[in-house]
Amino acid sequence: MDKSQDEMISEEIGNLLRETFEKVDGFYLDKGTSLFETLDDLSSGEVSVCPSGSDSSIAGHVRHISFFMNTIIGYNTGEIDEPTDWNQSWTVEKVTEEQWEELKKEVRESYETVKANVYGMTYWKNVDDFAGILCVLAHTAFHMGAIWKMTSQIRAWK
């Protein structure tokens, strides 16, 4: 049986999500630079530093990415139907090693929910659902750039 256009779209978006978060396949990132690969290479000390010129630490960016994904899925599923207080997404700055591991687990769980939502779409019922998932990709890419820049600044100080 041939795949529907919606199923093919879900599959391709899933491929981009996987490259962004899990493991680089060569679509648009360099080897070893997916979000999870990047985060696994950072210590709690590194992610707790707020470099000069930055309003947040890497830990703050990671918490914000997770919050953003949860919010998008909440809108897509109808669980959220009121304006979001984005300030709540920037509540983390410094973390212990245990808190860092928990934060990485949180962002992975948020991603798994997004991925399940995408692969569960055999029919994209409205443009908002589609746009929301594309926003996850674009928004995460922005914050990955910030994380890479901050990482290079922090490691240059060592």
Image: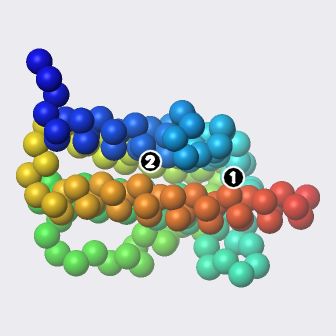
Residue at the extreme right: 158
The residue at which mark 1 appears reads as: 44
Q: Which residue is mark 2?
A: 106
Horizontally, residue 121 falls left or right of residue 22, namely left
Which quadrant holds residue 95? bottom right
Crowdedness near tag 2: few (<14), some (14–19) or many (≥20) residues, C-alpha within 10 Å: some
Residue at figure coordinates x 41%, y 44% from the top left: 17
Residue 152 occupies which quadrant of the picture? bottom right
Q: How is the image coloured?
A: rainbow
Specify the amino acid type for callout 2.
Glu
Q: Earlier in the sequence, mark 1 or mark 2?
A: 1
- Left or right: 31 with respect to 36? right
Q: CA distance from mark 1 to mark 2?
A: 15 Å
Q: Is residue 137 above or below residue 91?
A: above
**Residue at screen point 24% across, 35% down:** 8
Look at the image and tell me whether residue 105 can be seen.
no
Residue 3 seen in the current view: yes
Foreground of the two, 129 or 25: 25
Q: Using residue 58 as the reference point, say whether residue 107 is left or right of it.
A: left
Give percent across and percent down for residue 75: 19, 62
> Tag 2, which secondary structure?
helix
Where residue 141 appears, as percent x and y from the top left, is 51, 58
Query: Quick check: 109 above or below 71?
Result: above
**Of the pair 19 and 152, the residue shown nearer to us:** 19
Q: Which mark is residue 92?
A: none
SS for tag 1?
Answer: helix
Task: Say what amino acid the circle numbered 1 marks.
Answer: Ser
Q: Along the line of sight, which residue is nearer the eye, 67 or 20?
A: 20
